[in-house]
Structure formats: structure tokens, C-alpha cells
């Protein structure tokens, strides 16, 4: 769903997801993915006029993204 506007060379809203091939790439640009998470969780994305994934797909996506971001938090040393 995201790639229709944010992938394959497209960057609507100045967001292109083409460069995120793995978890390390996501973590290297954490602020972007926190914004993605916020927009998806809040129902802003996909926009109302675009096809939406099934609720179970959205839940699975958010759980996977939360796990990636939380895993990085757990692995970060505290100073």
C-alpha cells in the first residue's frame, strides 16, 4: 500500500521508501519511521481516498515496526 505513492521512484510528501532494504536502514533513519508509525497508527496513512490494508495487515505492520524500533532501544547502551 505504501509503495504506490512512496516507492518505485515516487516520493509523495517527500517520502521515498526505496532505500529501506533492511532493519539497519530503518534504524539509521529512525525519525522517518517513527513518523510513518504515527501516521499509520493514527489512520492518516494511507489517505482516506486510497485503498487501505485489512486491519490485521495494519496491526501486523505496526507490530513488526514496533519490534524493530524497540529492539534498537533495548540494545542501546545507556550513558
Image: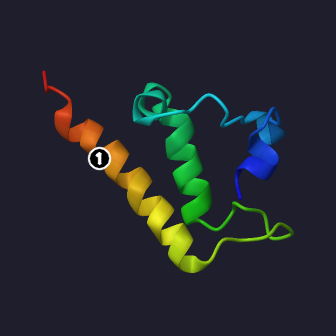
Q: Residue at x 55, y 68 (%)?
A: 58
> Which residue reaches farthest right?
49
Q: Quadrant of the C terminus?
A: top left
Q: Residue at x 32, y 52 (%)?
A: 67
Q: Is residue 40 above or below residue 57?
A: above
Location of mark 1 (residue)? 70
- Its colouring scheme is rainbow
| Residue 70, x across and y down, in percent | 29, 46
Quarter occupied by residue 69 = top left
| Residue 15, x across and y down, in percent | 72, 36
Quarter occupied by residue 6 = top right
> At numbered mark 1, what does the secondary structure look like: helix, strand or loop?
helix
* Label 1 packing within 10 angstroms: few (<14), some (14-19), many (20+): few
> Which residue reaches farthest bottom?
55
Q: Quadrant of the N terminus?
A: bottom right
Q: Is residue 54 above or below residue 32?
A: below
| Residue 11, x across and y down, in percent | 80, 35
| Residue 27, x across and y down, in percent | 42, 31
Q: Residue at x 86, y 69 (%)?
A: 49
Q: Residue at x 48, y 70 (%)?
A: 59
Q: Is residue 6 above or below residue 42?
A: above
Q: Is residue 15 left or right of residue 27?
A: right
Amino acid at each position: 500500500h505504501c509503495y504506490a505513492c512512496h516507492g518505485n521512484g515516487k516520493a509523495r510528501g517527500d517520502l521515498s521508501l526505496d532505500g529501506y532494504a533492511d532493519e539497519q536502514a530503518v534504524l539509521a533513519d529512525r525519525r522517518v519511521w517513527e513518523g510513518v508509525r504515527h501516521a499509520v497508527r493514527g489512520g492518516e496513512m494511507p489517505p482516506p481516498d486510497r485503498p487501505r490494508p485489512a486491519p490485521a495487515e495494519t496491526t501486523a505492520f505496526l507490530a513488526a515496526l514496533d519490534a524493530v524500533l524497540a529492539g534498537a532501544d533495548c540494545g542501546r547502551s545507556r550513558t
